[in-house]
Image (spheres, helix red, strand yellow):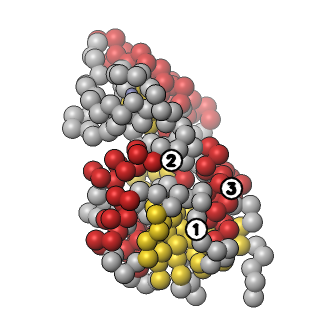
């Protein structure tokens, strides 16, 4: 059985064969926000993990964009939308580009998907290729457990969006050590405060897995695509209410509160030439 916490190229091919974001309002809003955050003077932009290219297309209206993705299916969509954009099939941790060869290197909703060692290697690569700026957007301090589903075939419990990491400003600035934060933007729908341990109880004993009728998802370990409604028992409701109550108590105790779903950071290289 393949391990979903190691690099899994086939998973992304399958994802981009069935996923289109060109009309997704959340992605279009994010695209507009990212374009606005690009500082004056930037001409060349590298979009790493461009997916089907909705953000790439918005960037390409103003800048000279190179789009990188490790999925050929994703790049085929980019070619369709943005035929003039340069496309490179590569993994984020091995960019076939020269040091400091693009004014700004950006990545949106990609880093949270990378297995641990790859995350660090990818950030080193983004930093290496960026002449001055890095623009990065990820879910903000996400409790990835909240959107877990259990595979009925192999019993793997996984985030349905493939998110492996919880990232925040401190974690990101650690990953981009040669850069400093110039701008921070929190945006997106409100995400309620939640604790992984409580969500785990809710899922295991209340059968509250992240599932809805018509959900299309593939188990990242065994490839299973058949997910049925979680079994319902009267006790589930009791667990659910108890978990809500425990979450409120924890939130009151710690001061945790709902927050916008995404964090976007604009970072500038400390040792700029010129
Ligand atoms: Zn499975």
The residue closer to the viewer here, 248 or 48, is: 48
Q: Position of residue 145 (x, y in %)?
A: 48, 33
Is residue 146 rendered to the left or right of residue 272?
left
Q: Is residue 154 at all visible to an observer of this figure?
A: yes
**Label whose residue precedes the other's in the sequence (1 or 3):** 1
CB of mark 3 near ligand 1 (< 8 Å): no
Mark 2 Cα shell of 10 Å, populated few (<14), some (14-19), many (≥20): some
The image quadrant of residue 33 is bottom left
Question: Do the residues under discs 3 and 2 have CB atoms within 8 angstroms?
Answer: no
At mark 1, the secondary structure is loop
Answer above or below: position of 65 versus 254.
below
Q: Position of residue 258 (x, y in %)?
A: 49, 45
Mark 1 Cα shell of 10 Å, populated few (<14), some (14-19), many (≥20): some
The residue carrying mark 3 is: 175
Q: Quadrant of ligand 1?
A: top left
At mark 2, the secondary structure is helix
**Label whose residue precedes the other's in the sequence (1 or 2):** 1
Q: Position of residue 95 (x, y in %)?
A: 58, 64
The residue closer to the viewer here, 260 or 59, is: 59
Question: Do the residues under discs 1 and 2 have CB atoms within 8 angstroms?
Answer: no
Query: For residue 96, which numbered disc appears in the image?
Result: 1
Residue found 50% across the figure and 51% down from its top? 139
Question: Do the residues under discs 1 and 3 have CB atoms within 8 angstroms?
Answer: no
Instruction: Give the position of the C terminus as an image quadrant.
Output: bottom right
Answer above or below: position of 6 versus 122.
above
Residue found 31% across the figure and 65% down from its top? 77
Question: In this rendering, which labeled residue sits more in front, label 1 or label 3?
Answer: 1
Query: For residue 20, which numbered disc appears in the image?
Result: none
């Amino acid at each position: 059985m393949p391990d979903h916490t190691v690099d899994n190229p086939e998973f992304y091919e399958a994802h981009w064969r069935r996923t289109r974001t060109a009309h997704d309002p959340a992605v279009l809003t994010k695209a507009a926000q990212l374009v606005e955050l690009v500082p004056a003077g930037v001409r060349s932009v590298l979009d790493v993990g461009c997916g089907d290219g909705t953000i790439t297309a918005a960037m390409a209206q103003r800048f000279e964009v190179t789009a990188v993705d490790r999925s050929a299916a994703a790049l085929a969509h980019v070619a369709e939308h943005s035929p003039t954009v340069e496309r490179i099939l590569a993994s984020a941790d091995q960019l076939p580009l020269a040091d400091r060869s693009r004014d700004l290197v950006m990545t949106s909703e990609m880093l949270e998907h990378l297995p641990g060692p790859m995350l660090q290697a990818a950030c080193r690569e983004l930093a290496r290729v960026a002449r001055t700026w890095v623009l990065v957007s990820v879910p903000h301090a996400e409790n990835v457990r909240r959107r877990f589903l259990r595979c009925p075939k192999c019993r793997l419990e996984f985030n349905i969006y493939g998110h492996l990491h919880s990232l925040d400003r401190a974690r990101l600035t650690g990953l981009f050590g040669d850069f400093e934060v110039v701008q921070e933007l929190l945006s997106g729908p409100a995400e309620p405060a939640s604790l992984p341990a409580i969500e785990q109880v809710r899922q295991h004993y209340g059968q509250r897995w992240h599932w809805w009728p018509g959900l299309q998802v593939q188990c990242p370990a065994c490839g299973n695509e058949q997910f049925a409604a979680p079994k319902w028992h009267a006790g589930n409701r009791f667990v659910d209410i108890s978990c809500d109550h425990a979450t409120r108590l924890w939130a009151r105790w710690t001061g945790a509160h709902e927050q916008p779903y995404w964090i976007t950071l604009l970072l500038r290289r400390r040792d700029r030439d010129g």
